Amino acid sequence: MWLETLILQTHQSYRDEIEAICHELFGCDEHLASALEIYLYESTVLNVTCHLRHETGDHTERSLQATRLMAVLQHYGPVQHRAWLPL
């Protein structure tokens, strides 16, 4: 098993739109989301954190699912990506 984390910070006015997109994407079988967190930081900064869990396959720098999700989220601001192996 290996994991990926995507982090986006954007303006809070995008909250409803981002929630709809993420829930639609994570409803697909090809995305295995172990967690999705969307919350406000201070009064205007929206933090979006997506954790993708891959039960099979080799650990790679970036999965196809993360690449697709990043392409969608980059419309709202820069997206940070990390791929890692659990302890």
Image (tube, rainbow, N blue to C red):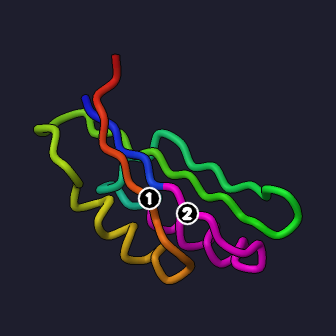
Please give the label number shown on residue 42.
Answer: none
Amino acid type, residue under disc 2 in the picture:
Leu
In which quarter of the view is residue 21 placed? bottom right
Which structural element holds mark 1? Answer: strand
The dominant secondary structure in magenta is helix
Distance from Cα at disc 1 to Cα at disc 2: 7 Å
Residue reaching furthest to the left: 58
From the viewer's side, name the closer residue of 48 and 23. 48
Disc 2 marks which residue? 8
Residue 2 vertical placement versus 7 (above, below): above
- Asked if the residue at tag 2 contacts the one at tag 1, i.e. Cβ–Cβ closer than 8 Å, the answer is yes
* Image quadrant containing the C terminus: top left
Find residue 6 and report its horizontal and vertical position in percent.
45, 54
Specify whether residue 66 is painted magenta: no
Query: Which span of residues is magenta-colored?
Result: 7-25
In this picture, is 53 found above or below 10? above
Using the image as rendered, state which of residue 55 and residue 15 is in the foreground: 15
Q: Which residue is drawn at 48% across and 73% down?
A: 73
* Residue 59 relative to residue 80: left or right: left
Please tell me how many numbered marks the rendered image carries.
2
Residue identified by numbered label 1: 80
Task: State the residue at coordinates (31%, 70%).
Answer: 68
In this rendered view, identify the residue nearer to me: 6 or 24.
Answer: 6
Q: Quadrant of residue 2?
A: top left
Give the residue type at disc 1. Answer: Gln
Across and down, in percent, residue 62 comes to 23, 54
Looking at this view, name the residue that lies furthest to the right. 43
- How busy is the neighbourhood of tag 2: few (under 14 within 10 Å), some, or many (20 plus)? some
In the rendered image of this protein, does residue 5 appear above or below residue 47? above
* Residue 21 highlighted magenta (yes or no): yes
Residue under the point 68% across and 56% down: 38
Of the two numbered discs 1 and 2 on the same chain, state the one appearing first in sequence: 2
